Image: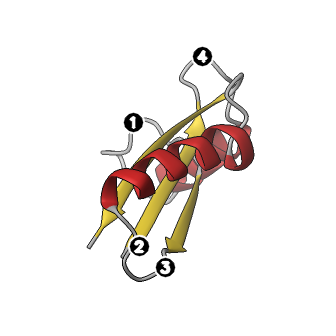
Amino acid sequence: MKARVTVSPKKTVLDPQGQAIGSALKGRGYATVQDVRQGKVFEIELAKGTDSGKAKRDMEEIARDVLSNPVIEDYRVEILD
């Protein structure tokens, strides 16, 4: 079983990397690109036999306390089979 944690800046937080990427894409002619937000993805391998409910609770805690800064970032946890 694996977990995927996606961390990205909150919509209200300036994202200079995302803006730079968006500008570069528009400069290359990708007119369909309206906005880019840059973030991080963590793929975490879980121990065999881990209960999916416990895995979700643990990953939520890890995402909140270790992988993100909840003041300026949002996160999403997915448990993958």
Give how far across and how far down residue 48 sits, in percent.
41, 83
Residue type at mark 3 is Ala
On the picture, is 55 further left or further right than 70? left
Reading the image, the residue beneath label 2 is 2
Q: CA distance from mark 4 to mark 3?
A: 36 Å
On the picture, is 32 further left or further right than 10? left
Q: Earlier in the sequence, mark 1 or mark 3?
A: 1
- The disc label shown at residue 34, or none: 1
Q: Earlier in the sequence, mark 2 or mark 3?
A: 2
Q: Quadrant of residue 65?
A: top right
Q: Earlier in the sequence, mark 4 or mark 3?
A: 4
Q: Earlier in the sequence, mark 2 or mark 4?
A: 2
Reading the image, the residue beneath label 4 is 12
Reading the image, the residue beneath label 3 is 47
Is 56 above or below relative to 75? below
Give how far across and how far down residue 24 sits, in percent.
59, 54
Q: CA distance from mark 1 to mark 3?
A: 40 Å
Front: mark 2 or 3: 3
Residue type at mark 4 is Thr
Is 48 above or below relative to 3? below
Circle 3 SS class: loop
Front: mark 1 or 2: 2
Q: Are marks 4 and 1 in contact (CB under 8 Å)?
A: no
Residue placed at 71% from the left, 22% from the top? 71
Residue type at mark 2 is Lys
Circle 2 SS class: strand
Front: mark 2 or 4: 2
